[in-house]
Amino acid sequence: MKIHFIWAAWEKLYRLNYNIPPMGILRVAGMTPPDIDAVFTDEMVSEVDRNSDADIIAISFLTPAAPHAYQLADHFRANGKYVVLGGTHTTLMPEEAGKHADTVVIGEAEGIWEDFISDFCSGRPHPSYRSPHLPDLGNLASVRRSLLPKRVYPYSNPVLYGIESMELSRGCTSNCAYCLVPSTQGPVFRNRPMEDVCREFDAVSRTDGILFFTDNNLLGNWTFTRPALEALVPHRKDWIGLMAPEDAARDPVRLELLLESGLCGIYGTVFAITGNEPPSVIEIRKRNLRRLIEAGVVVIATFALGWDDHDQTVFERTVGFCLEAGLTVPEFIINTPFPGSRLFRQYRAQNRLISTDWSLYNGNHAVFRPARMSAGRLEEGYHACYDLFYRSVDRDKALFDGFRDRVLNAMIRARRKQKETYDPPGH
Ligand code: SF4
């Protein structure tokens, strides 16, 4: 028997050519008994074989990839394949996904993927599998990294430099209106046992790639993150994490540990700029960002546009903030009410949703009616932010084709410099 695991592409990241391995589906591959053949296609980096000889096609996807994933699923079913859909969007919209699948896997797969495999092998698979509770993260199946083609994840190539992803925990105690984590992973932090974390640190430290922590709120879970990072220090491993950059810089003691453990890049949202903040608050926020940049951290700061207190002046003010803070690779996105989020429910209740074409839910389109400008003006302003900030270069080239190299090379340079100049306490 053979399973073809597919991580379905969505337009924006595909154009970025971002070679971050999708860990969730690779961990599902790791839960699969070893006597079952497995192949994997990450559509972000390679074409899927539509003539796959696998018995089961297992597709995982995010919301903007949903229309494409459904088209793939329909194609494979028409060719007699058994199709399983899972991942974030399937979890949020299981009935919709079920129209394109033989089986849907709802929620985290630990415990239920093994049930599906067993039922399939005995000829009685169910149309849906849902775990009755959020799984414990002890003894997680290994991420099946052996399925990653070296050609597209060139960890050993110091020029191209790959990224190795890993998680410490799941869930989040905050309840941000736009976020899917509370509804998909639960409203509390579930941590992996520290011995499992350390074992994985040993494994990933043998590769050359930058480590990417996929945890959505590393700093919010600091009582667990702190000892984990302390354990990472001896590995001298460069890492990138998702966090609000300003939060990373605010506490000097915490920043010191972040740097000592190898922090070289942050990808995260900068709190929305409303125009109502006192100048002193704006100055503190800029100073926090500068502190990170001066410490050698590449800050890929995301600015969401289109909040209800944003008027047409927000675009120029946001770009001005980026320039004055010294940011080099800001990302601008249009606020997006993903299905399953509080924001989606709010806009739907207010009759403000313009479209539920999920392919538009990628941060490039205004899919709702903003409060203080038209949707068209919001999209124009979003593009204007890129034009204003990246005015000296072709925007698409700078941001999409060249984004990866620009960011990664900058991280490598920054990290080298940091290693040369940073003198950790006690050394
Ligand atoms: S945006 Fe971050 S802090 Fe807010 S709920 Fe999501 S993971 Fe938690």
Image (cartoon, grey):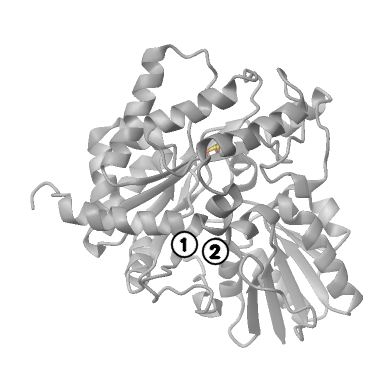
Residues under numbered marks 1 and 2 in contact, where contact means CB atoms less than 8 Å apart: yes
Q: Would you say residue 137 is visible in this rendering?
A: no
Label placed on residue 189:
none
Three-letter amino acid code of the residue under disc 1? Ser
Name the residue at the left extreme. 427
For image coordinates 33% across by 74% down, the residue present is 206
Rendered position, 281 above or below 175: above
Label placed on residue 23:
2
Percent position (x, y) of residue 84?
77, 68
Where's the N terminus, which quadrant?
Answer: bottom right
For image coordinates 51% across by 37% down, the residue present is 389
Snapshot quadrant of residue 130? bottom right
Label 2 crowd bin: few (<14), some (14–19), many (20+), radius 10 Å: some
Rendered position, 44 above or below 192: below
Percent position (x, y) of residue 391?
53, 40
Percent position (x, y) of residue 27?
56, 68
> Mark 1 or mark 2: which comes first in sequence?
2
Is 180 positioned to the left or the right of 253 in the image?
Answer: right
Q: Would you say residue 248 is visible in this rendering?
A: yes
Q: Which of 274 and 42 lies nearest the eye of the viewer?
A: 274
For image coordinates 58% across by 57% down, the residue present is 16
Label placed on residue 165:
1
Snapshot quadrant of residue 376? top right
- Secondary structure found at label 1: strand
- Secondary structure found at label 2: helix
Snapshot quadrant of residue 18? bottom right
Q: Which of 343 and 304 lies nearest the eye of the viewer?
A: 304
For image coordinates 55% across by 34% down, the residue present is 388
